[in-house]
Amino acid sequence: MVERQKFGNLIPHVILCIGVLIVAFPIYIAFVASTQDTATIANGQMSLWPGPHFLDTYYRTIFVGSSGTTREPVAMMMFNSLVMALMIAVGKIAISIISAFAIVYFRFPFRMSIFWLIFITLMLPVEVRIYPTYKIVAQLHLLDSYAGLSLPLIASATATLLFRQFFMTVPDELLEASRIDGAGPFRFFKDTLLPLSRTNMAALFVILFILGWNQYLWPLLITTRDDMQTIQTGIRKMIASHDALTEWPVVMATAILAMLPPVFIVVAMQKLFVRGLVETEK
Amino acid sequence: MTTRGSMQKQTVFQSRLLPYLLVAPQLAVVLIFFYWPAVQAVIQSFLVQDAFGLSTTFVWFDNYRDLLAEPGYFNAIVRTFVFSFLIALSSLSAALLLAVMADKPLRAGPFYRTMLIWPYAIAPPVVGVLWVFMLNPSLGILAHGLRAMGFDWNPLLDGTQAAGLIILAAAWKQISYNFLFFLAGLQAIPSSVIEAAAIDGARPARRFWTIIFPLLSPTIFFLIVVNIVYAFFDTFGIIDTMTRGGPAKATETLVYKVYQDGLLGGNLGGSAAQSVILMVIVIGLTAIQFRFVERKVNY
Amino acid sequence: MANVVLRNVRKTYPGGVEAIKGVDFEVGDGQFCVLVGPSGCGKSTLLRMVAGLETITGGEIDIGGRVVNEVEPAERDIAMVFQNYALYPHMSVYNNMAYGLRNRGMAKGEIDTRVREAAQILEIMPMLERKPRQLSGGQRQRVAMGRAIVRQPKVFLFDEPLSNLDAKLRIAMRVEIRKLQRRLNTTSIYVTHDQLEAMTLADILVVMNGGLVEQIGNPLEIYKKPATTFVASFIGAPPMNLIPLQGADANLAGAGSGAGILGIRPEDLVIANEPAPPGGVSLDLIVEAIEQVGAETYVYGVRSRQGETPTVSAKPGELPPGEILVRVPGQSGPAIGERIRAVAARDKLHLFSADGRKRVDS
């Protein structure tokens, strides 16, 4: 510290506390609302303290479903979100690590063209090509399927670039030592490269899982059946156009449930998360 | 001793077939779900289909001309950029302030850090739901406050208020992301540089503007681009849950318009042209980002 | 147990750069061969070609009577110790050593015996379960050697294995490597840029420069009779004084042989008052600088004769033109600015052709 401040660290504390309040307030309100009954909230008489309806609201939300526009319990939606997020995260990591392995550790015709083909996908998120992609997924009969939900989102270059970058930092001598030790490409990949990539894979998984879990536009388009909707698309349908019909405690409970898994991951695996975030954005 | 290519190892495995098998899955996904639709969009944007979908004609840039002549589309472009600018500006300044404070050696530093980081994990539609609830004119807790202060709050009818709502919610969500990168950028500045400035007689505020801020400029630039891209695309979930583009299209951004027009069906060529224009904008943004990330504004 | 023969070995990179321009030599069974030369001379490339890590674009490499040009590294029955050790960072010391044996499908019991035996020899028994990052530089070095030993290969290859160690450890490990090699009696090829390491380790020394072999032979023979001025200045420290024989110096060597280069090692020059013995050389010097090393003193002088322009330009490891270095035992020596005479006997002189590529005396 360069110098002492007159008021100690009072100013930073105050500013940070205000920041934390701003960030946390909406979530606190959501939680409080989820523990009160629908009528109180609809009348605009919501209390700022948690109410007595925690258990029955969450039970109803998770296992029964709201009586409004959705008929599905949130447990179902969470399961769909989970499957989609896992497929995206695992799928991306799997296809990326092997293609990066090929690009870095082999020399073959069209290697650079293939690299560029993959690299360019970095530039276009799914949002800009939703309808053409939708048409293709429909032609492939993948609407309302987990494959349709996840495959188009797997097509991205970030993970490939990340692994390529990491492989380039692995000393050449490790490959040479493995070759002298009698390891071919498969053995080298399995015994050396995979174990060394563990942290990178974990960091990437954390980020990709969160991104997958939070997908919205694509699932909205691609799912028509209620039993295929994810929690993010489900929550939108719970808000009826008339305020009076919306069961706000259930909506807020769903919001809390929707943020629970990714927030848990961020808080519990903060180091991996930060690392993954910084690296995927490079 | 030997020249090393930047793209590859010096020693490599020898195999004819294996590398192709290894890239095949990714290549397949990329070709089917990326290039095929992208190419179709480009082709489609040059065609016009008759009302019954029986014949198509090649019309060059007519779809683009029609699109840009449409006042609604032009407004959406302007609106999207205004939104992006305001979201980036408010979120970046709030995050920078917090990061500078959190960079000080406080005992509670890790706590603040965690508390400020985790909203990153909240999905845009959930953010929309949270804020729409708090600011709902009839039952929202913040809306009550606004009314009590004599503010005529009704984003369901007032387009400007609705836009403010979107910008507020979107900026709020992005604070944690920006905070994280600012903090990392601040921690990367060697303390010796700041100490040298202190010895040179620079007071804290001056140190910030003459030393820290310029050294942070690569991070700031990077974040500006990321925030604009975020405002372009990830706000979709916020808009869709909060205002659905209304009232009277006051919150309709480019992506939302693509979605809406596509939902209505009909003009395939125009819809494709919208997609292509979006692609061009994103490619432009990414290119800018690469240029600056490569050159690292300050060093 | 095997010998290694290189026949007109060449390496040309796809861009047309010639790294190895035709190298021939043989390492006999159980011999310790050291490749020495400045960085970029091709010594590492040559070693990696023997290992099979670089392709051979011309000539033949023969290990134990089998031409191995097209043989995979794993099939050549060699083991290699890398400069940065190349230990598998995620494997324990034990697994680092066992990995190559497992890949060859050796029985578990046999692997265990070999690993423990090697660990015993190298005194790394207590570290078998540790990861490489928990080891010191010297211990990593031992593990790298252990990985080579357990394989019981025909040939050991060392690629500057000591250059990442500090000076003290380097000497200790040097001695150990030599002892180990004598004990195992395994044919070894060792690459280094350190001439002291080269001199002390080698049975046969191969001095390389610019992709070519400058001289091959017993280290002491090379020290006594360097074949070129390059070898003369590279082997031996401090380097040999090289004096171009032109103009007034033409008859310096007494032989009156005209143009050429005269070499005298600093340790062969003696400060004396009397003129040189018959056939010897005497140099009149003005002392410019003195370095006290303790056991000996380096005296730097310039020729006191006027009107001469030096023509040999300084290369790395060489003295600046016109400067002569005299190595005097003990701490006694002249003072700066003093005029001295340094003499060398007839049999201490080395004569080279004018381009330095050939030795012209016997």
Image (tube, coloured by chain):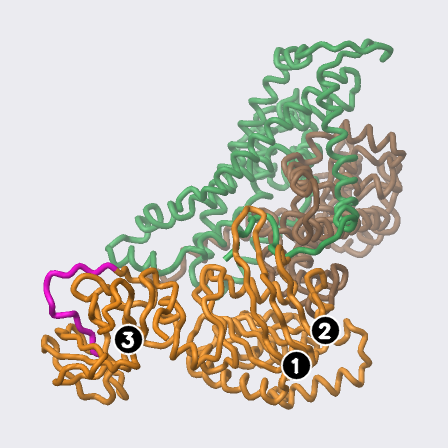
Chain colours: A brown, B green, C orange
| Residue A32 visible in the current orientation | no
> Mark 3 or mark 2: which comes first in sequence?
2
Q: Chain of mark 1?
A: C
Q: Is residue B236 above or below residue B22?
A: above
| Residue at x-position 14% and y-position 79% | C341
| Residue C305 visible in the current orientation | yes
Of the residues tagged 3 and 2, which is closer to the observer? 3
Foreground of the two, B103 or C350: C350
Kind of residue at badge 2: Gly
Foreground of the two, C33 or B54: C33
Q: Are marks 2 and 1 in contact (CB under 8 Å)?
A: no
**Callout 3 environment at 10 Å: few (<14), some (14 to 19), or many (20+)?**
many
Of the residues tagged 3 and 1, which is closer to the observer? 3
Which disc is residue B278 wearing? none
| C-alpha separation, residue under disc 3 versus residue under disc 1 | 42 Å
Kind of residue at badge 3: Ile
| Residue at x-position 18% and y-position 83% | C271
Q: Secondary structure at mark 3?
A: strand
Give the x, y percent position of residue A47.
67, 49
Give the x, y percent position of residue A228.
86, 41
- The residue labelled by disc 2 is C100
Foreground of the two, B44 or A256: B44
| C-alpha separation, residue under disc 2 versus residue under disc 1 | 11 Å
> Mark 3 or mark 1: which comes first in sequence?
1
- The residue labelled by disc 1 is C149
Q: Where are the magenta residues, as a range?
A: C298-311
- The residue labelled by disc 3 is C264
Q: Chain of mark 3?
A: C
